[in-house]
Image (cartoon, rainbow, N blue to C red):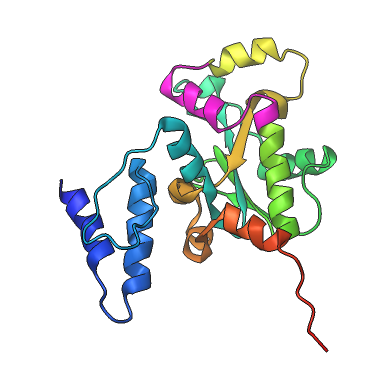
């Protein structure tokens, strides 16, 4: 109930100079809790509308970190048995991705959090082409059943363990057995290192794509 009052305050507040910040907080909390972010035009007060699960997930996925970032996990590092952990150096991960044609041009690759080689962050340029390249890498992991859903399943214990994954992929490269990745969204900020977390902003993927697809306006003569 306290959260609902907070969001209602954000909607109702018209304090000069803070309206945009209030609406931003309103949207962020709604996305986090799976509530509809649409703002009623003439309503006096605000009441949360719970979205169906599919719509709530789509709403979360729309709020990406910018410049675009892909978070990559080495699932073996989550194993509580040190002898089962297999470190893949950051340089080898980058070489593997470039060798597969999954990243090109200027990207920044660094350790995420925790900085124990379990999380690697790949940051792309904050451009339309940078977003397209990040989505390409995201799609690669998703198409190979090593995306966000599969990673969360393994971490929660509902998916395959790293050992069973290795058996299924016997003969594949180590990177194809252990690396899982996905496009970073607002809830992934805590996966980033200090600098990337400091300089990242949250943007709507749909709004960026709409801008990219908008017709070019020519000056009338």
Residue 4 left/right relative to 62? left
Is residue 188 positioned above or below 203 on the image? above
Residue occupying image coordinates x 55% and y 33%:
148
Residue 73 in percent (x, y) is at 57, 35
**Whether residue 155 can be seen here:** yes
Is residue 159 positioned above or below 204 on the image? above
Is residue 93 in the magenta section?
no
Is residue 155 in the magenta section?
yes
Residue occupying image coordinates x 73% and y 12%:
170
- Image quarter where the C terminus lies is bottom right
**Whether residue 114 can be seen here:** no
Classify residue 12 by image quadrant. bottom left
Residue 22 in percent (x, y) is at 31, 66
Provide the residue span drawn in magenta: 142-159
- Image quarter where the N terminus lies is top left
Residue occupying image coordinates x 42% and y 31%:
53
């Amino acid at each position: 109930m306290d959260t609902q009052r907070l969001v209602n305050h954000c909607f109702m507040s018209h304090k000069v100079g803070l309206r945009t910040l209030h609406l931003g907080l309103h949207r962020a909390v709604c996305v986090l809790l799976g509530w509809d972010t649409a703002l009623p035009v003439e309503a006096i007060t605000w009441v949360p509308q719970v979205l169906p699960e599919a719509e709530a997930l789509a709403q979360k996925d729309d709020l990406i970190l910018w410049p675009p970032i892909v978070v990559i996990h080495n699932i073996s590092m989550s194993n509580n048995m040190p002898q089962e952990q297999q470190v893949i150096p950051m340089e080898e991960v980058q070489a593997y991705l470039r060798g597969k044609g999954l990243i090109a041009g200027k990207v920044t690759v660094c350790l995420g959090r925790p900085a124990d080689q379990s999380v690697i962050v790949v940051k792309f340029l904050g451009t339309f082409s940078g977003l397209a390249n990040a989505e390409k890498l995201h799609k690669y992991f998703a198409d190979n059943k090593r995306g966000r859903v599969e990673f969360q399943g393994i971490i929660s214990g509902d998916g395959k363990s790293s050992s069973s994954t290795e058996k299924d992929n016997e003969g594949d490269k180590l990177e194809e057995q252990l690396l899982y990745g996905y496009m970073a969204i607002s809830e992934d900020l805590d996966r980033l290192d200090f600098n990337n977390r400091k300089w990242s902003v949250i943007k709507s993927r749909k709004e960026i794509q709409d801008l990219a697809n908008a017709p070019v306006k020519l000056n009338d003569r």
